Amino acid sequence: ILTCSVDGISNGCHVPDREKHLYGESLMVICDQGYYISTNYTNSTCQEDGSWEPDIPECLIVSCGNPGEPDNGYAEGTDYTYGSNVTYICDDGYTLNGTETITCQADGNWNADVPLCQCSQCYDESGSDSQS
């Protein structure tokens, strides 16, 4: 009887969940939350020579991309993948308005927008305090 082996799927699983599959049987890869299929297919079929066709896909971590930095402030954190955090700090004289730490979500979006750094020690430049 011809069989195909399956090593564990990193950051995912396969259905049916067996180590050996018979020639002609298919399996489907399901990725864990925060991971996505590396190909445009999810199923692979056991071939006569013991290989899988197409190759069994991998599960890759979701990336939210660089969220950017606020004017008059900066971001700490360079990992923009699922579950990672970026923390914002404002320059001296500026106050954070928004979420200080944002997290990359499974859907590839950050859980909040980049906050603003607003001037906390500014004065009115319109001359409203001038004498008339």
Image: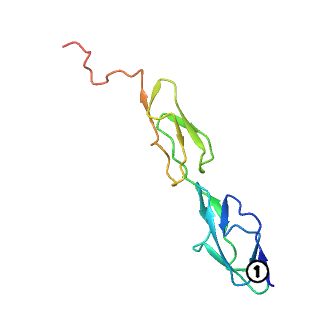
In the rendered view, tell whether residue 60 sits above or below residue 130: below
- Disc 1 element: loop
Toward which corner of the image does residue 86 lie, by quadrant?
top right
Q: Which residue is drawn at the image coordinates 48% and 39% (left, top)?
A: 70
Residue 82 coordinates in the image, percent (x, y): 59, 50
Residue that sits furthest to the left in the current view: 132
In front: 11, or 86? 11
Toward which corner of the image does residue 39 lie, by quadrant?
bottom right
Q: Which residue is drawn at the image coordinates 31% and 22% (left, top)?
A: 124
The quadrant of the picture occupied by the N terminus is: bottom right
- Amino acid found under the numbered disc labelled 1: Ser
Q: Residues within 10 Å of mark 1 (few under 14, many from 20)?
A: some
In the rendered view, tell whether residue 15 sits above or below residue 67: below
Residue 47 coordinates in the image, percent (x, y): 73, 84
Residue marked by disc 1? 51
Residue 130 coordinates in the image, percent (x, y): 25, 15
In the rendered view, tell whether residue 70 sits above or below residue 15: above
Q: Which residue is drawn at the image coordinates 22% and 12% (left, top)?
A: 131
Q: Which residue is drawn at the image coordinates 60% and 46% (left, top)?
A: 83
What is the image's colouring?
A: rainbow
In the rendered view, tell whether residue 93 sits above or below residue 71: above
Residue that sits furthest to the top in the current view: 131
User: In this figure, what is the number of numbered marks?
Assistant: 1
The quadrant of the picture occupied by the C terminus is: top left
Residue that sits furthest to the front in the current view: 1
Residue that sits furthest to the right in the current view: 1
